[in-house]
């Protein structure tokens, strides 16, 4: 996917407003705008789209589709969302943590989620998903 944007446009705005990739959310209450940038988590609201030019950017959308990634699948099995506003940020952060260390413990994955907040408080269900993912090795 590509778009021509002005140099001042953030990656978040480029995704949502120019590419119709709307999973990332702007709220500035921590993390719902998280994407994977070259395999590492990044807040897309704090990056310029130009900084990601020609580089690998993955969003929650890239974990969906016919071959559903194990992270959103585990969220579904554990009923780990309510309003879903925070979910794209959490699933991207968990995917990045497990890609970095497929043998991560649930505690290590949870540590990688620092900065993500769920206002609906679905933490116990997310914990269920994380435990399930760690048992399966990501
Ligand atoms: S929208 Fe607040 S951290 Fe990105
Ligand atoms: S599910 Fe609503 S904010 Fe997390």
Image (tube, helix red, strand yellow):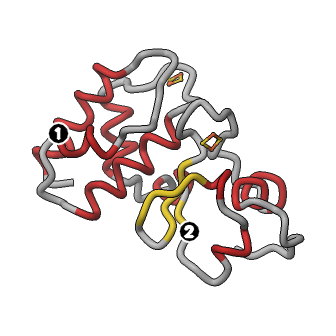
Q: So how many labels did they put on this image?
A: 2
Task: Judge left or right: residue 45 versus residue 116.
Answer: right
- Number of the label disc, if any, that sits on residue 118: none
Q: Dividing the image into 4 quarters, which one contains the N terminus?
A: bottom right
Tell whether circle 2 marks a residue whose Cβ is less than 8 angstroms from ligand 1. Answer: no
Residue lying farthest bottom?
Answer: 54
Determine the residue positioned at 75% across, 59% down.
Answer: 10
Measure the C-alpha gap from mark 1 to mark 2.
25 Å
- Number of the label disc, if any, that sits on residue 106: 1
Determine the residue positioned at 42% across, 44% down.
Answer: 91
Residue lying farthest right?
Answer: 6
Tell whether circle 1 marks a residue whose Cβ is less than 8 angstroms from ligand 2. Answer: no
Question: Mark 2 Cα within 10 Å, few/some/many (few <14, many 20+)?
Answer: some
Residue 35: where, in percent of width, then height?
A: 53, 56
> Tags 1 and 2 in contact by the CB under 8 Å rule?
no
Rendered-image quarter of ligand 1:
top right
Determine the residue positioned at 51% across, 55% down.
Answer: 65
Task: Judge left or right: residue 17 versus residue 103.
Answer: right
> Looking at the image, is 19 positioned above or below residue 31?
below
Residue 49: where, in percent of width, then height?
A: 72, 68
Q: Quadrant of residue 138?
A: bottom left
> Looking at the image, is 67 positioned above or below residue 118?
below
Task: Judge left or right: residue 5 versus residue 111.
Answer: right
> Looking at the image, is 137 positioned above or below residue 28?
below
Q: Which residue is mark 2?
A: 57
């Amino acid at each position: 996917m590509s778009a021509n944007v002005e140099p001042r446009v953030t990656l978040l705005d480029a995704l949502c407003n120019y590419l119709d990739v709307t999973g990332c959310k702007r709220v500035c209450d921590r993390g719902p705008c998280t994407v994977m940038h070259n395999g590492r988590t990044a807040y897309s609201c704090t990056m310029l789209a130009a900084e990601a030019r020609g580089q690998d950017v993955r969003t929650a959308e890239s974990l969906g589709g016919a071959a559903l990634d194990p992270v959103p699948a585990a969220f579904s099995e554990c009923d780990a969302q309510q309003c879903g506003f925070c979910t794209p940020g959490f699933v991207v952060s968990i995917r990045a943590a497990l890609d970095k260390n497929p043998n991560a413990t649930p505690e290590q994955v949870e540590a990688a989620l620092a900065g993500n907040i769920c206002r609906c408080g679905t933490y116990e269900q997310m914990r269920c998903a994380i435990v399930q993912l760690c048992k399966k090795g990501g």
